Amino acid sequence: MDDDVDVTLLSVLTRRKPLLERLATHPTRKCDLASELDVSRSTIDRGIRDLEQLDLIERDGREYRTTLAGELALTEYDRFSHRVSNVVDARAVLSSLPPETTIDPTFLEGADVVVSQRPDPQRPARELERLTQSTDYHRGFGSAFLAHLVAVYRDAIVDGLDCEFVVTSDVLDRLVSRHHEPVSEALSTGRIELREASESASLPYCLIVSRGETTAVATVLVYVDEGLKGIITNDDPAAVAWAESILEEIWAAATPISFDGE
């Protein structure tokens, strides 16, 4: 199928979706369609013509019904619309990422989006803090962080949270130079392992998988110059599996370190 046909199909599905959905329930005559959909007969005529030209419906005697292609097109259109809706819902956070950023659409399916904005700009950070308190294990990749979250993680680790984190060299330098005490306290528990990211680990966002006794949550954190822009969380197994696969690759390529860099 060429691009022109793709565009035409999408346009027809957008405009004629109510008619196609109605015919998907059972075959119907034109005159009945006009009254049931509360539109003019001329609108029905144009809709029937558009759908017939793309083989999405067919005539059966005096009635019209969907073809297999019509049924499948309707299903795929609904799926596509839902995914676009997911992106729109997350756009306040996603808009701060480079256009070449890769995030699996699966991760956005049913995700919760928390944005740093008035009147509660600290809400995303509090949500992450809640995850440190309600789960037992975190694995993550960090290319940026809020200073106060170092203390949050230190307290959680001291209280029993197990962590595996890969951080960029810039983040590692900041931890060493500015947060020596809380990081040392966390490391002394033996419940956190740090690794330095390889040069190929170039995610423009931070990624964490948090696991509890019966729950698992994947979290994308997006930072801007002013701080944490927002987070996107999802506890769907497919979303968690996607995040875990990314983190496993980053972890395997990273270099084990101690806090002093040895």
Image (cartoon, rainbow, N blue to C red):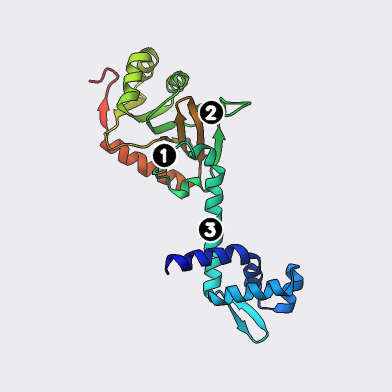
Disc 3 from disc 2: Cα separation: 32 Å
Q: Residue drawn at (22%, 20%), measured in percent from left and top?
A: 262
| Residue designated by label 1 | 98
Disc 2 from disc 1: Cα separation: 28 Å
Check disc 2 and give the amino acid type.
Arg
| Residue designated by label 3 | 79
Whole-percent x, y for residue 203 in the image = 36, 37
Q: Residue drawn at (62%, 77%), measured in percent from left and top?
A: 65
- SS class of the residue under badge 2? helix
| Residue 110 visible from this viewpoint | no
Please rate how many residues cluster around mark 1, counting C-alpha atoms within 10 Å: few if below 14, some from 14 to 19, many from 20. Answer: few
Q: Residue drawn at (42%, 32%), measured in percent from left and top?
A: 138
Tell which tag, 2 or 1, sits nearer the viewer: 1
| Residue 92 visible from this viewpoint | yes
Q: Residue drawn at (37%, 25%), measured in percent from left and top?
A: 191
Relative to 196, 64 lies left or right: right
Relative to 147, 252 lies left or right: left
Check disc 3 and give the amino acid type.
Arg
